[in-house]
Image (cartoon, rainbow, N blue to C red):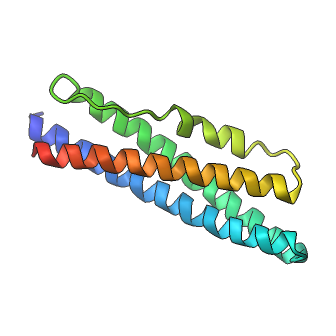
Amino acid sequence: MNYRDEILQAIGAADEALYCLDQARKQLLSARNWGIFDIFGGGMVATFIKRRKMSEAKAYAKDARESLMKLKDELDDIDDVIEFDLDMDDFLSFADYFFDNSFFSDLMVQGRINNARSKILQAIDNVKQIKEELEEEL
């Protein structure tokens, strides 16, 4: 496979990761909003919707993790030509930390939602930067 094809594959992996990360971000934003409503007496319906949104965010985070690993593999293929700094450690471990199936008070859940959103936004910025660098190489 030639250099250009390797870069195009890496860009495709970056696009896939960005899609999953953005979907997780949207679900966490919705979960946060429902969580705020829940704190102020939203009741069982708000709790149910918040937890469903958190579950959906978890699924997208899992997909994002797989996409980021694929991106890392693609970057390794071209690493001898371009050097990237893809620090995914925080993001790759956040799902285990955030979604541990333990019971937490609504306020603690809100803190975890906000922390997860922050990690996802950081990962989105990192992947966008890498994608821009890849596109410059074409």
Q: Residue at x 74, y 53 (%)?
A: 111
Q: Residue at x 51, y 62 (%)?
A: 23
Q: Residue at x 57, y 51 (%)?
A: 118
Compared across the picture, whether 85 is left or right of 24 comes to: left
Please state which of residues 29 and 23 is positioned toward the viewer in this rendering.
Answer: 29
Q: Residue furthest top?
A: 80
Q: Residue at x 18, y 38 (%)?
A: 6
Q: Is residue 93 above or below residue 113?
A: above
Image quarter where the N terminus lies is top left
Q: Is residue 127 above or below residue 39?
A: above
Image quadrant where residue 82 sits: top left
Residue 37 x/y as whole percent: 80, 75
Give the number of marks.
0
Residue 41 x/y as whole percent: 90, 76
Residue 71 x/y as whole percent: 35, 39
Image quadrant where residue 133 sits: top left
Please state which of residues 137 and 53 is positioned toward the viewer in this rendering.
Answer: 137
Residue 124 x/y as whole percent: 43, 51
Q: Is residue 90 above or below residue 81?
A: below
Please state which of residues 47 and 70 is positioned toward the viewer in this rendering.
Answer: 47
Please state which of residues 14 and 117 is positioned toward the viewer in this rendering.
Answer: 117
